[in-house]
Image (cartoon, grey):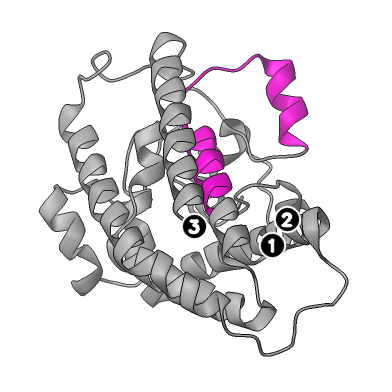
């Protein structure tokens, strides 16, 4: 487990650095004041990342490890070795699609998830801007899945690294060649797909829920027909972004139903 965690940390950090530099050298949408011109937003997103990184080590990984040691006999007998890992990754990606969809459709979950959507500009740092309440709720939901399907901790940590890499990629502001992005979008979620999910229009916000594989939205009818545009409005429809302390408090404050 220690080796997997170390590898995950190094690999994801290098991928983040590559995308962070790439989106500033070749941006798809105009940046705000150069490399660090929007430093208050960057600092706030980094604050969520720092807290969630600590929570991951202190709570999320131990809870996942505990859940992985419980066997209630629902796991199919046939997947093992590389096939078993592939089975686990596809299963977890399928389930995270439904969890993401639930975060948009259940008011209690949306209160936490909206903190992510209030960001009015997308780049790699948006990928780590999640309220720690959402992180803890996700850890609990994932623990149930791990128990039900007896998913090994190695598969869980591998999937977590894959999700982080995919999330950094599809939130990034890096401009990809059109042909390459179209080809990739048939397999994985690309920025052109996920930016539409952050479009400040409810019909698009409540669509494009896939995280790694893009097929789930096509399969379950949640793919938005909207095409990404460089100047499309980003954020939660009808709401502005908040200061960091107000973002932390936001899920606990009453407000009108959307």
Please state the extent of the stretch shown in magenta in the rendering.
160-186
Regarding residue 231, the answer to whether it shows in the image is no
Crowd band around label 2 with a 10 angstrom C-alpha radius: few (<14), some (14–19), many (20+): some
Q: In the depicted view, which residue is nearer to us: 229 or 195?
A: 195
Q: List x then y, in percent, for residue 206.
A: 54, 57
Q: What element carries label 2?
A: helix
| Image height of 19 relative to 156, above or below | above
Q: List x then y, in percent, for residue 12.
A: 46, 37
Which SS does the magenta portion mostly show? helix
Regarding residue 244, the answer to whether it shows in the image is yes
The quadrant holding residue 98 is bottom right
Of the image marks 3 and 2, the number of the one nearer the N terminus: 3
Say whether residue 228 is left or right of residue 64: right
Crowd band around label 3 with a 10 angstrom C-alpha radius: few (<14), some (14–19), many (20+): few
Q: Do the residues labelled 3 and 1 touch (CB within 8 Å)?
A: no
Image disc number at residue 94: 1
Q: Which residue is under mark 2?
A: 216
Q: List x then y, in percent, for residue 131.
A: 30, 59
Q: Which residue is under mark 3?
A: 1
């Amino acid at each position: 487990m220690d080796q997997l965690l170390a590898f995950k940390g190094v690999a994801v950090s290098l991928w983040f650095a590559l995308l962070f530099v790439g989106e500033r050298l070749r941006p798809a949408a105009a940046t705000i004041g150069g490399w660090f011109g929007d430093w208050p937003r960057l600092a706030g997103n980094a604050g969520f990342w720092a807290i969630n990184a600590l929570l991951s080590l202190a709570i999320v990984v131990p809870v996942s490890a505990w859940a992985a040691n419980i066997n209630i006999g629902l796991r199919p007998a046939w997947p093992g070795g590389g096939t078993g890992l592939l089975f686990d990754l596809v299963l977890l990606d399928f389930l995270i699609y439904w969890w993401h969809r639930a975060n948009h459709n259940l008011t209690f979950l949306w209160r936490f998830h909206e903190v992510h959507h209030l960001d009015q500009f997308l780049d790699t740092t948006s990928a780590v801007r999640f309220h720690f309440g959402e992180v803890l709720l996700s850890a609990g939901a994932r623990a149930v899945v791990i128990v039900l399907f007896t998913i090994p901790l190695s598969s869980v940590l591998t999937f977590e690294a894959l999700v982080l890499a995919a999330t950094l990629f599809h939130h990034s502001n890096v401009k990809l060649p059109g042909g390459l992005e179209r080809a990739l979008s048939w397999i994985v979620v690309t920025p052109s797909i996920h930016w539409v999910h952050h479009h400040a229009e409810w019909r698009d916000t409540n669509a494009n829920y896939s995280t790694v594989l893009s097929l789930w939205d096509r399969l379950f009818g949640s793919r938005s027909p909207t095409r990404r545009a460089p100047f499309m409005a980003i954020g939660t429809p009808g709401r502005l972004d908040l200061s960091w302390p107000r973002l932390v408090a936001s899920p606990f404050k009453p407000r009108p139903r959307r």
